[in-house]
Image (cartoon, rainbow, N blue to C red):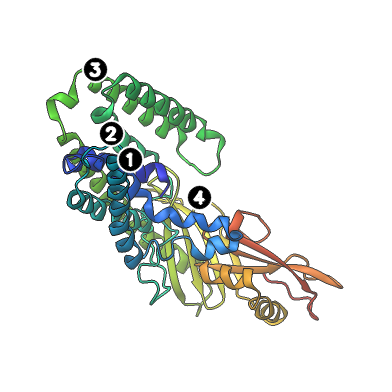
């Protein structure tokens, strides 16, 4: 998930009562909620393929999360003790309380990351297998609303706090209203109406003194609502998988078994799902809409499995570092030659079909490598 969502989880957890266990616990909650993303520091020492190889790696695995959960409170408590000694004052933080906070909140990070289709490798360094929840898009405005609304009600108590929350609300609202220019979201009007209505309701609740009346029950209600939302998405996902299988069986050739299939969420649209499936002959992608007989809502994309000259080219480039890392990450890798009729040199184009297609650049989700032309005219699609 994005770091705003992680931060809001940490802040909501603090306001649920964890901020009472020790001074500095609120700050630690926010730090712990984001701690596993310390792996982004690898960008200082390597290129984008180094980042792809290590992102959501050991710091998101169980062993790494455990180390971070113990290390972070030791650092916070140590800094507090040094500062207290410098000022000739007793230390304020309580190590035992900080440990409890850190263990609870740090564990939420890999759980949230598991819910989307990027995946997490829980059992590194012993196993590099990826696990995917396929429930929540990597950015979810509805989670921003639920957790942000609760955090606002419980933390906007000072003038500066109110100003900060006002700025956050304005910036996020502009982002949500600006979403219609993006092709990544389907039901923009519904999101805009829900977002603006919720913002108005939270402002009204704040004016009516909801935080004084209900206290940390608001935080618990927010987490309960998140669990309910996940349950709804889980049901929607199960229907998406079933419908995808039903439709996939109608478009494959006779005797073409479906090996594996994934239904993945789309941005802020729980009824629309991206479906990708693989057979022994090809990899397919389409988007479907639940509660509708007219699916899929997009044309079916099909890439044949590499064979002949393309397979030979892939075998050669798979030994190169970028291709090796990319293929280790890609869940549904597909490939084609940019110009299968070339005479000297062309590009072999790789992509992870859950995100993009070959030849359409999208950061580390696609890769192009120069290769000598194959001896045959056979392409890759």
Quadrant where the C terminus lies? bottom right
Sequence-wise, the earlier of marks 4 and 3 is 3
Horizontal and vertical percent position of residue 321: 63, 72
Q: Is residue 341 above or below residue 159?
A: below
Q: Which residue is mark 3?
A: 207
Q: Residue at x 79, y 68 (%)?
A: 346
Q: Are marks 2 and 3 in contact (CB under 8 Å)?
A: no
Q: Is residue 256 above or below residue 292?
A: below
Badge nearest the viewer, 2 or 3? 2
Q: CA distance from mark 4 to mark 2?
A: 37 Å
Q: Which residue is mark 4?
A: 297
Q: Are marks 2 and 1 in contact (CB under 8 Å)?
A: yes
Q: Which residue is mark 2?
A: 151
> Quadrant of residue 215 in the image?
top left
Q: Which residue is mark 1?
A: 8
Q: CA distance from mark 2 to mark 1?
A: 7 Å
The local secondary structure at tag 2 comes to helix
Q: Is residue 377 above or below residue 240?
A: below
Q: Are marks 3 and 1 in contact (CB under 8 Å)?
A: no
* 71 to the left or right of 342: left
Q: Are marks 4 and 3 in contact (CB under 8 Å)?
A: no
């Amino acid at each position: 998930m994005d770091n705003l969502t992680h931060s809001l989880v940490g802040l909501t957890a603090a306001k649920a009562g964890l901020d009472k266990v020790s001074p500095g616990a609120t700050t630690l909650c926010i730090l712990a909620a984001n701690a596993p993303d310390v792996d982004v520091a690898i960008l200082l020492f390597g290129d984008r393929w180094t980042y792809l190889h290590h992102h959501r790696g050991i710091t998101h695995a169980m062993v790494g999360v455990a180390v971070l959960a113990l290390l972070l409170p030791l650092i916070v408590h140590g800094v507090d003790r040094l500062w207290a000694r410098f000022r000739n004052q007793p230390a304020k933080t309580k190590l035992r309380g900080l440990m409890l906070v850190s263990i609870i909140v740090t564990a939420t990070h890999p759980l949230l990351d598991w819910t989307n289709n990027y995946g997490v490798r829980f059992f590194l360094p012993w196993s590099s297998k990826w696990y995917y929840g396929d429930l929540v898009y990597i950015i979810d405005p509805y989670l921003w609303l639920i957790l942000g609304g609760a955090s606002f009600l419980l933390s906007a108590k000072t003038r500066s706090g109110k100003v900060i929350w006002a700025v956050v609300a304005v910036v996020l609202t502009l982002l949500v209203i600006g979403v219609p220019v993006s092709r990544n979201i389907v039901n923009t009007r519904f999101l805009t109406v829900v977002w603006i209505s919720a913002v108005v309701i939270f402002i009204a609740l704040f004016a009516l003194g909801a935080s004084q009346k209900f206290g940390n029950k608001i935080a618990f209600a927010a987490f309960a609502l998140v669990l309910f939302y996940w349950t709804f998405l889980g049901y929607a996902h199960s229907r998406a998988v079933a419908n995808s299988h039903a439709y996939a069986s109608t478009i494959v050739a006779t005797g073409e078994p479906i090996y594996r299939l994934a239904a993945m969420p789309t941005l802020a649209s729980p009824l629309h799902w991206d479906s990708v499936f693989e057979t022994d002959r090809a990899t397919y992608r389409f988007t479907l809409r639940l509660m509708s007989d007219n699916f899929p809502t997009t044309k079916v994309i099909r890439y044949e499995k590499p064979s002949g000259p393309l397979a030979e080219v892939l075998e050669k480039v798979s030994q190169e570092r970028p291709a090796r890392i990319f293929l280790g990450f890609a869940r549904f890798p597909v490939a084609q030659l940019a110009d299968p009729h070339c005479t000297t040199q062309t590009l072999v184009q790789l992509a992870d079909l859950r995100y993009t297609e070959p030849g359409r650049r999208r950061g580390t989700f696609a890769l192009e490598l120069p290769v000598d032309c194959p001896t045959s005219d056979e392409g890759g699609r």
